[in-house]
Amino acid sequence: MRRAIATTFRKLLGRSDYTHWSSLSTHSSKWDTRTQKLAQLIPPNSTVIEFGAGRLMLRDMLPEGCSYTPSDLVDRGYNTIVLDLNAKCLPTLARYDVAVFSGVFEYVIDVPRLVRYLGDFAGNVICSYAVVELNQRGRREQGWVNDYTSGKFVSLFTSLGFDYRFGQRWKAQMLYGFRNKTSNSAKHLHLTTPAPAVTRFCISQRPPGSNRSCTTLHPSLARSTSFPG
């Protein structure tokens, strides 16, 4: 409850949680398989920037010939670009073939602003997101400051100049790939299959007292979806 209250106040004030994320002890090794999944989408010889770089695990998972630039709230070494994605002003960055976000978007207060910002320099965006369909409860206790369904998250990118290229479930999260329509980058995400369409899916397992409802959801979520309660 205490963290939920603190999260709400930070959201109102537009502030990031420096206290929580400054220490690497809060970066779990359980997230490494997620990072590995995202790394598999990156083409060889790409210029890559990772936001929320943390333990820099992506650096050693990249395909041959890739260059790596970490970015985080605090300096992680390896020429980290220290950047607060919730700051009022965001710096101009060099162009990159791929921007990676592993467990970051949930902590961004103004996601549309960030997506527009990415449109200025990122040829492709690869990211994870804990969609509402699979994480209905306890979002503020997790420190998450936004609440997107899968369909709305994808639509946010496609409405701001990106093509939806990839979607896959990882545990209770989704992994996504998007291509910048205006980018001159010759690099395209390394996809083995085309991205399935986002479709309508009815949630049959809901908390007690709530009605069965439908929501826009990536079809891969329907395979083994469960909800609390």
Image: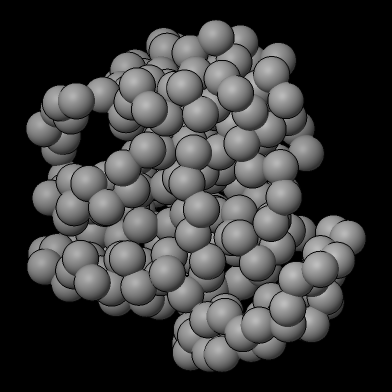
Q: Residue at x 65, y 67 (%)?
A: 133
Q: Quadrant of the N terminus?
A: top right
Q: Is residue 174 left or right of residue 110?
A: right
Is 61 situated above or below 135?
above
- Image quarter of residue 97: bottom left
Q: Is residue 201 left or right of residue 17?
A: right
Is 37 situated above or below 83?
below
Towards the viewer: 117 or 135: 135
Residue 31, visible in the rendered structure: yes
Q: Residue at x 69, y 56 (%)?
A: 135
Towards the viewer: 121 or 114: 114
Q: Residue at x 49, y 59 (%)?
A: 148
- Image quarter of residue 224: bottom right
Q: Quadrant of the C terminus?
A: bottom right
The total of numbered circles placed on residues is 0
Question: What percent of the width, then of the height, locates residue 60?
Answer: 57, 37
Residue 97, visible in the rendered structure: no
Question: What percent of the width, then of the height, locates residue 53?
Answer: 49, 30
Question: What percent of the width, then of the height, locates residue 177?
Answer: 43, 66
Q: Residue at x 38, y 27 (%)?
A: 12
